[in-house]
């Protein structure tokens, strides 16, 4: 039972007690036991005994009498002690009648308020029940829908179970086809083993010649110089013939890195010229990815490590990014806040060519994952000079363009389906672009695109990102190595390529 109902019951009980006391006690006090009251539907009629008169009365709002007080007539002896007590009692009773009327009125007001409040509470409960009913219906519909979906899934699982044998047969046939494709490689591997034996023999002959030459230094004239010279030339010819059988290879493994030096900011580039002669080992160093025009040159790796600069170049333009390349004695870089490529000759100290790379995004429109205005990446491999970038026309995916090294004209382009913004870095080896999936720890070569076949494949070639952040990664065909700028460290990665050996039947 609610609190308002308890209050209402308490008020009713109190009013009943007061009314009962008034009806039973007062008449006996004033000698009115013979007073007759009418029914509630009529006015109260009082028949006092002779010598008594109506002293006071009280009526409710409907005109019904709720209290009447009679008293002896005024001509009775006023000195009588009983009369005085009676008058005092009458005065008190006269005060009680209005109080009873007020109490009854207040009672009805309180009762009405409590009933109205209870009515509102009942209405609110009715609304809550209606909302709950709607939610229940909605949940029931959801359960029915889920039941339908579960039945559909059950049917699909049954179908998969029925088709399992068919799928196994199909997969077995695919494996058999792959094995048939691998069978032609067996003769190639056999030829590779034969060439490996030849290389071992060459090494043994070189050791023998070296020992002979050492002996000649001790005792000149003991051997015929012309004969030795002819043997050396013959060995060199045979080695070159063996090397000609090795075509461009496919990337299989990346090992390292070897830390060459720690210097500069987190971002930068360092490189050597892949077309330089064996005696020319100059190193070029370009710190930061923007707001810089200074290129530092070192005569060798040893000078680079020790910090012995041989020359400094002040470029006419600031560069953007870290994806520059030195190729055949010239520096190729992206001009800041543009898609213009600059060719700068170190020997002449001036710009030889510049050209806009049409539609290429620039200034962090399509950078690598690390940003740094790395929109346009210039690189070189065994085939030539390349530019890797992205365009709106190719939906922000990577575009590969082969460039003329003299005029910077685009000779041919390939559009890939790999988003430039999802690539950590990229590099070219033998006309194939290799793309990493991140510049942070855990990065790996994830995607490759062959410009020879215009096909792509997803790869899984991990490498050790020792210093956690790579902002430059380029392949050098002469060194067969990857040059990297690894969070302020200049490092080298070795690469393992799978070579296809040409046999005499292929020529």
Image (tube, rainbow, N blue to C red):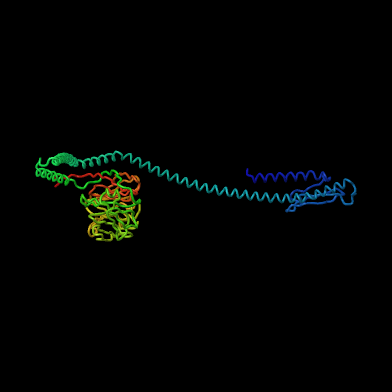
Counting from the top left corner in percent of width and height, residue 192 is at: 18, 41
Which quarter of the picture shows residue 185?
top left
The residue shown at (50%, 47%) is 135
Res 190 visible: no
Circle count? 0
Res 479 visible: yes
Left or right side of 20 for 343: left
Q: Residue 445 versus residue 57: which sits nearer the camera?
A: 445
Counting from the top left corner in percent of width and height, residue 143 is at: 45, 44
Counting from the top left corner in percent of width and height, residue 430 is at: 23, 49
Q: Residue 232 versus residue 343: which sits nearer the camera?
A: 232
Location of the N terminus (image quadrant): top right
Please tell me whether residue 497 is drawn above or below residue 293 in the rendered image. Answer: above
Left or right side of 105 for 174: left
The residue shown at (87%, 45%) is 82
Counting from the top left corner in percent of width and height, residue 301 is at: 26, 48
The residue shown at (81%, 46%) is 35
Q: Residue 283 versus residue 361: which sits nearer the camera?
A: 283
């Amino acid at each position: 039972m609610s609190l308002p109902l308890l209050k209402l019951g308490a008020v009713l009980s109190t009013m009943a007690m007061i009314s009962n006391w008034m009806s039973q006690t007062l008449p006996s006090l004033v000698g009115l036991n013979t007073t007759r009251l009418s029914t509630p539907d009529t006015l109260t009629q009082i028949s006092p005994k002779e010598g008594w008169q109506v002293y006071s009365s009280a009526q409710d709002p409907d005109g019904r009498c709720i209290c009447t007080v009679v008293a002896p007539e005024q001509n009775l002896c006023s000195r009588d002690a009983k009369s005085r007590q009676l008058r005092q009692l009458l005065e008190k009773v006269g005060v009680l009648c209005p109080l009873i009327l007020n109490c009854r009125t207040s009672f009805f007001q309180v009762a009405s308020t409590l009933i109205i409040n209870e009515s509102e509470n009942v209405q609110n409960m009715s609304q809550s029940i209606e909302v709950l009913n709607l939610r229940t219906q909605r949940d029931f519909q959801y359960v029915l829908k889920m039941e339908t979906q579960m039945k559909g899934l059950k049917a699909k699982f049954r179908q998969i179970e029925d088709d399992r044998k068919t799928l196994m047969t199909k997969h077995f046939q695919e494996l058999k086809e792959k094995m048939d494709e691998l069978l032609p490689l067996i003769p190639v591997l056999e030829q590779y083993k034969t060439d490996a034996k030849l290389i071992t023999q060459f090494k043994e002959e070189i050791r023998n010649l070296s020992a002979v030459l050492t002996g000649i230094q001790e005792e000149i004239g003991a051997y015929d110089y012309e004969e030795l010279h002819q043997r050396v030339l013959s060995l060199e010819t045979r080695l070159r013939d063996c090397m000609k059988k090795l075509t461009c290879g496919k990337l299989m493994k990346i090992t390292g890195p070897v830390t060459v030096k720690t210097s500069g900011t987190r971002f930068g580039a360092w490189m050597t010229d892949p077309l330089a002669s064996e005696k020319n080992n100059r190193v070029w160093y370009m710190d930061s990815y923007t707001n810089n025009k200074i290129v530092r040159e070192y005569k060798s790796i040893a000078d680079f490590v020790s910090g012995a600069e041989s020359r400094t170049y002040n470029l006419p333009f600031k560069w953007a990014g870290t994806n520059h390349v030195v190729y055949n004695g010239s520096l190729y870089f992206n001009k800041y806040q543009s898609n213009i490529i600059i060719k700068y000759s170190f020997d002449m100290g001036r710009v030889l060519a510049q050209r806009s790379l049409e539609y290429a995004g620039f200034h962090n429109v399509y950078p690598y994952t690390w940003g740094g205005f790395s929109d346009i990446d210039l690189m070189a491999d065994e085939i030539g000079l390349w530019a890797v970038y992205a365009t709106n026309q190719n939906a922000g995916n990577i575009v590969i363009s082969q460039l003329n090294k003299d005029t910077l004209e685009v000779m041919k382009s390939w559009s890939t389906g790999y988003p430039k913004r999802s690539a950590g870095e990229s590099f070219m080896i033998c006309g194939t672009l290799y793309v990493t999936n991140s510049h942070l720890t855990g990065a790996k070569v994830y995607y490759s695109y062959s410009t020879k076949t215009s096909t792509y494949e997803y790869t899984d070639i991990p490498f050790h990102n020792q210093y956690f952040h790579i902002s430059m990664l380029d392949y050098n065909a002469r060194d067969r190595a990857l040059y990297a700028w690894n969070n302020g460290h200049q490092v080298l990665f070795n690469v393992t390529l799978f070579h296809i050996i040409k046999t005499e039947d292929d020529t």
